[in-house]
Image (cartoon, rainbow, N blue to C red):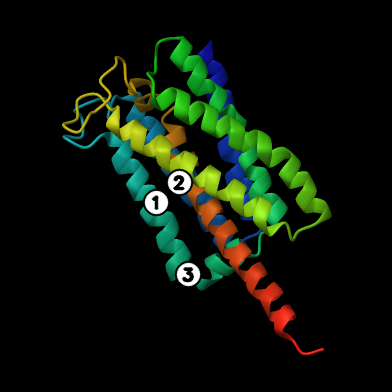
Amino acid sequence: MLDIIGTIFTSTAFALIVGTIAVYLPRDLATRWLVGAALWGAILVSLAAIGAFVPGATGRIPGPGLAFIAAILALFGAFGLSARFRNALLAIPMPVLVGLNIVRVGGVFFLLLLADQRLSSPFATSAGWGDIITGLVAIPLTFALTQNTRLVWPVGLWNVFGTLDLVSAISLGMLSAPGTPFQVFTAVPGTLAMTTVPWIIIPTILVPIFFLLHFAIVAQLRFAKRADDAQLVQPA
């Protein structure tokens, strides 16, 4: 039952985030974005379904880690190399960028998998509570941003916390992965559940996109601060 609910949630979150970003892209880029995301998702789910991400299947480095790196390189490569994609992403309204993180309240699934003895601490507790806090705080922050888009410091602090949560989750996930030479946290079952459907969607699709959203927020905050500084130095 937990896997069924998780499938519904992760699929909905994936469609919501990818679809929302597509709305703000030029039509041709939106088509490529949607097709690329759909193909990436289909490939990952298919590989996970046949056990391609189980411990040892990809050698010394966990399969989800390799897929995560590939997604990060693709997303940030597009951001750096395509000015049209970069400009479109940076033009997404701040309330939307922050609001998309509300789905991270789904971090409760990490805690449920921990309770079901399908994930271990410290990965599950850190990733679970970190995501829940990030998602819950994003709710009032998004509402506040619809009234006042220049909440630089509150958004900045929240953005740092949300980013560190992702960094912590990825780091602890790698250090808890069974069958790897760098496994530090050896409690069974480690992160085994994250190699299966539907949970593989989180580290290999959703987390890389959240990293990109956090980066876009940082860029927008920097532009806002520069604009404020420019206004302060203007002569009366």
- Please say if the residues under marks 2 and 1 sit with CB atoms less than 8 Å apart: yes
Q: Nearest to the eye among marks 3 and 1: give it.
A: 1
> Which of disc 1 and disc 2 is earlier in sequence?
1
Instruction: Tell which of 222 and 32 is nearer to you.
Output: 222
At a point 57% along the width and 18% down the height, the residue shown is 5
- Please say if the residues under marks 3 and 1 sit with CB atoms less than 8 Å apart: no
**How many numbered marks are there?**
3
Spatial CA distance of label 2 from label 1 is 6 Å
Instruction: Tell me the number on the disc at residue 155.
Output: none
The residue most toward the bottom is 235
From the top left corner, tell me how far across and down residue 47 is, in percent. 33, 32
From the top left corner, tell me how far across and down residue 195 is, in percent. 35, 27
From the top left corner, tell me how far across and down residue 194 is, in percent. 38, 26
Q: Amino acid at mark 3?
A: Ser
Is residue 151 rendered to the left or right of residue 161? right
Pointer 1 residue: 72
Q: Amino acid at mark 1?
A: Ile
Is residue 44 rendered to the left or right of residue 131? left
Q: Nearest to the eye among marks 2 and 3: give it.
A: 2
Instruction: Tell which of 176 and 39 is nearer to you.
Output: 176
Quadrant location of the C terminus? bottom right
Q: Amino acid at mark 2?
A: Pro
- Please say if the residues under marks 2 and 3 sit with CB atoms less than 8 Å apart: no
Spatial CA distance of label 2 from label 3 is 18 Å
Instruction: Tell me the number on the disc at residue 208.
Output: 2
Pointer 3 residue: 82
Q: Secondary structure at mark 3?
A: loop
Spatial CA distance of label 3 from label 1 is 15 Å
